[in-house]
Image: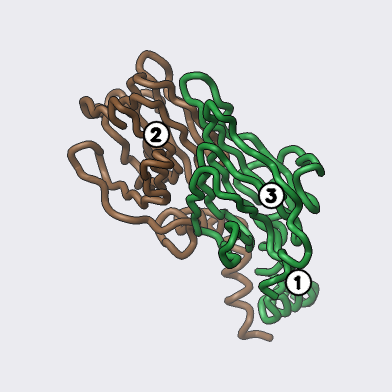
Chain colours: A brown, B green
C-alpha cells in the first residue's frame, strides 16, 4: 500500500490545483493524437503573426467549390486582417480564440462557438494570448476569389482586450 | 489513509478494465456537456430511421447561403436515402459512422474522417449498429433546393457490412 502513496499524492495534488485539466487542454492543441483532425502544414508567415497550421479537410472542385480547413493557432498567433468575397463560417472546436470585424470589439471564441462573417468585411482571427485555438473554417471560392489579405494585426490591436 | 482505499480501488479497476475510456466515449455522444456542440432538436422520423438530433451551427442567409449543422445519431440510427443538388461535405467528429453512395460499398467513418458527396448522388449516412456517431454537415442551398429525400435504408442494406 505504501508505494501507492506518491501516486495518490500526485493525482490529488493535480486535481486540486487544476493541473490535470490544463495539461489536457494544452495537449489537445499540440498533440495531433488528441485533436480531431491532424494539425497539417505551417501557414505562410506572410499572412499570419506567430505559429499556425492548416489541414485541408475538404478539397474544392467544380461540383463542390467550398474548401474546408482545420486551423490551429499557437497562443498569441493570429491572421493578418483580411476579407472573403464569399464570406466565411468559423466553428471553434478547441482552446480559446479571438475574432474581430473592423470597427467592432474583439469577440472571444470558445469550443462550440460559431461565427458567420459576411462577404468583404475586413476581419481577423486567432488564438488568445495565453491559450491556443483550433477552428474549422468554411470559405467558399467565388468568381472574385476566396481571400484578400491586408495588413498585420498590431500588438496594440491584438492586446486591446487585456 | 484507509478511507481512500475504495477510491483508489475504483480508479485502478476502471483503468485496468478500460471502463474509464468507454464511459468517456459513450458520454461524448449522449451528454451535451462533453460534446463540442449541443445535441439540438430531434430530427423528423419521416426521413430518418432511429433517433437522431440536429443542431444548426450556421444559419444561411442571402450573403452566405451554406447551412452548417451538427448531427448526432444514436447507434443504429441513419438517414433515409437522399441526394443534395449542391453536394455535401461531412466531417466526422465523434463515434463510428457509416456512409454509402448508391452502388458502392459502405464506408466506415471515424473521428477525423471527411466525405465530399457530389451533387445529386443518392447516399445515406448514420451511426454504426453498436456505436453512435456525430458529424458536421455542410450542405449548400441551391436554386434547385438543398435535399431530395428518397426511401428508407432497409435493415438488409444497413447490416450488409456485418
- Of the numbered discs 1 and 3, the one sitting upstream in the chain is 1
Residue in view at x 63 percent, y 61 percent: B98
Q: Is residue A35 left or right of residue B32?
A: left
Q: Residue at x 60, y 58 (%)?
A: B102
Q: Pointer 1 indicates a residue of which chain?
A: B
- The residue under label 3 is B72
For mark 2, does the 10 Å Cα neighbourhood hold few (<14), some (14 to 19), or many (20 or more) residues?
many
The x and y percentages for residue A29 are 43, 53
**Residue A140 circle label:** 2
Using the image, name the chain to which the residue with label 2 belongs.
Answer: A
Q: Secondary structure at mark 3?
A: strand
| Residue neighbourhood size for the residue with mark 1, other residues' Cα within 10 Å, grouped as few (<14), some (14–19), many (≥20) | few
x and y percentages locating residue B58 in the rendered image: 56, 31
Q: Residues within 10 Å of mark 3 (few under 14, many from 20)?
A: many
Give the vertical position of A155 relative to B4 (above or below): above
Q: Quadrant of the N terminus of chain A?
A: bottom right
Amino acid at each position: 500500500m505504501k508505494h501507492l502513496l506518491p501516486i495518490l499524492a500526485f493525482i490529488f495534488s493535480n486535481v486540486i490545483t487544476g493541473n490535470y485539466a490544463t495539461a489536457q487542454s494544452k495537449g489537445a492543441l499540440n498533440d495531433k493524437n488528441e485533436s480531431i483532425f491532424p494539425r497539417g502544414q505551417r501557414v505562410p508567415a506572410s499572412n499570419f503573426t506567430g505559429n499556425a497550421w492548416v489541414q485541408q479537410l475538404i478539397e474544392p472542385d467544380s461540383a463542390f467549390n467550398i474548401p474546408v480547413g482545420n486551423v490551429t493557432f499557437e497562443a498569441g498567433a493570429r491572421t493578418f486582417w483580411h476579407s472573403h468575397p464569399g464570406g466565411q463560417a468559423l466553428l471553434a472546436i478547441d482552446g480559446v480564440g479571438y475574432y474581430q470585424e473592423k470597427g467592432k470589439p474583439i469577440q472571444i471564441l470558445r469550443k462550440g462557438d460559431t461565427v458567420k462573417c459576411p462577404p468583404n468585411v475586413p476581419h481577423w482571427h486567432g488564438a488568445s494570448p495565453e491559450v491556443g485555438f483550433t477552428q474549422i473554417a468554411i470559405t467558399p471560392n467565388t468568381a472574385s476569389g476566396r481571400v484578400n489579405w491586408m495588413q498585420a494585426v498590431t500588438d496594440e490591436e491584438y492586446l486591446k482586450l487585456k
